[in-house]
Amino acid sequence: MTQQNKTSQNWPSWLPLRGNLRELSPYGAPQLPADAVMNTNENPYAPSPALAQAIAAKIALVARNLNRYPDRDAVALRSKLADFVNELSTTTMKSENIWVANGSNEIIQSLFLAFGGGSAIGFTPSYSMHPLIARVCQVAWTNGSRRPDYSLDVDSAIAQIQSSKPSLTFITTPNNPTGSAITLAEIEKLAINTPGLLVVDEAYAEFSDETSAITLIEKYPHIVVIRTMSKAFAFAGARVGYLVAHPSVIDAMFLVRLPYHLSSLTQAAGEVAIDFRAELLGTVAQLRTSRIQMVQELEDLGLTVLPSSANFLLFTGFEQSAADLWQALLDRGVLIRDVGLLGHLRVTIGSEAENKRFIDSLSQCLGVEI
Ligand SMILES: *Cc1c(COP(=O)(O)O)cnc(C)c1O
């Protein structure tokens, strides 16, 4: 929290901070103690003791080699990720099609470093880190627009892309913070009409019924798909994100990555997690069922919920300000997210107990009997 409200006047004049960083605030989803933590789209279900044990055993082996640098190219982990992707999407990706880093945020940064010579565009509201990382990397960013209901108008997006001629176009599907997904046909239409790279951020793909854009890469080599183990995969603490793309894109990642960027410990934990994918992804069906139930409960409270294909819901229709309702929920032990959209709040689908706690607290805050 301490860093959160740092504004330009806090910077001492002797500090040679780059001018374009002076008025920025650090990424700051509040990390506050709460009984129900439903603000950062994590999977609420912790790894099993068996998985924790397997990770510990593998780490114990790796620890005996910590005097040595890790495999710079993370080949074992990238091969496992390729197999995993192929299993999910019936593709034929190899390790040369995969890049892996400390969370997909590092992947996004590497994309800007490698391909940010021109400008970049995304369609707001969307993932706030895309423009923020662009700025830190000194890449010119264009805030493209969506429909008033926040859905993506693909024809309008294409017109905006063609007028700004970006080298990187970001599409998040399902979109964060709105939850809506676009279809594979729409992604293909975008790909046909997009210069440079079309970056599809699929952080929430496992929660959606849409086919992954990974299936289009063979036909459209300028499609780059970002995935993460932080959301559906229930592995946010380990920091593993990956990218699936044409091998030339991966070759460019080698140019901008820091040497030995992914520690032996992370690589080992990631490999074990993929072996346990059935367990880790096993909670996705439960979360999808809970999502359907929570939409109903929010609507029963008189609220409006945006259609979601992800593990969170954006809702509106309450009378207080978003900041006041957010605080009132926190006072009742429930931490959700004020994403800065007027009259809207975002809640992550939690465990069944957390969901109940949220709905009960919310009905109190709204003064509605349930
Ligand atoms: C959460 C999120 C990510 C980042 O996740 P990492 O933990 O860095 O892998 C990327 N994109 C979107 C849209 C997200 O919501």
Image: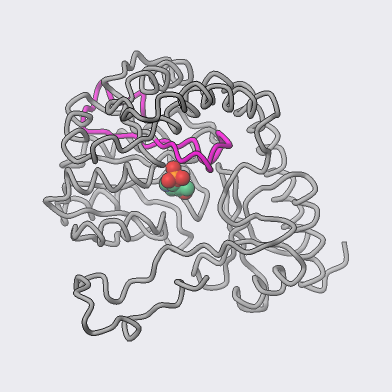
Location of residue 281 (image quadrant): top right
Return the residue nearer the eye: 88 or 158: 88
Residue 345, relative to residue 106: is it above or below?
below
Return the residue nearer the eye: 356 or 162: 356
Residue 40, relative to residue 226: is it above or below?
below
Residue 93, relative to residue 119: is it above or below?
above
Q: Position of residue 130 (x, y in %)?
A: 33, 54
Location of residue 287 (image quadrant): top right
Residue 10, relative to residue 154: is it above or below?
below
**Residue found at x 48% / y 20%:** 88
Residues in magenta, as a range: 214-241
Location of residue 18 (image quadrant): bottom left
Residue 8 appearing in the image: yes
Task: Indicate whether residue 17 is drawn in magenta.
Answer: no
Q: Where is residue 279 in the image (x, y as percent from the top left)?
A: 64, 24
Q: In this view, does 318 lie to the left or right of 267?
A: right
**Residue found at x 27% / y 75%:** 22
Q: Position of residue 284 (x, y in %)?
A: 63, 33
Residue 175 appearing in the image: no
Q: Residue furthest right?
A: 369
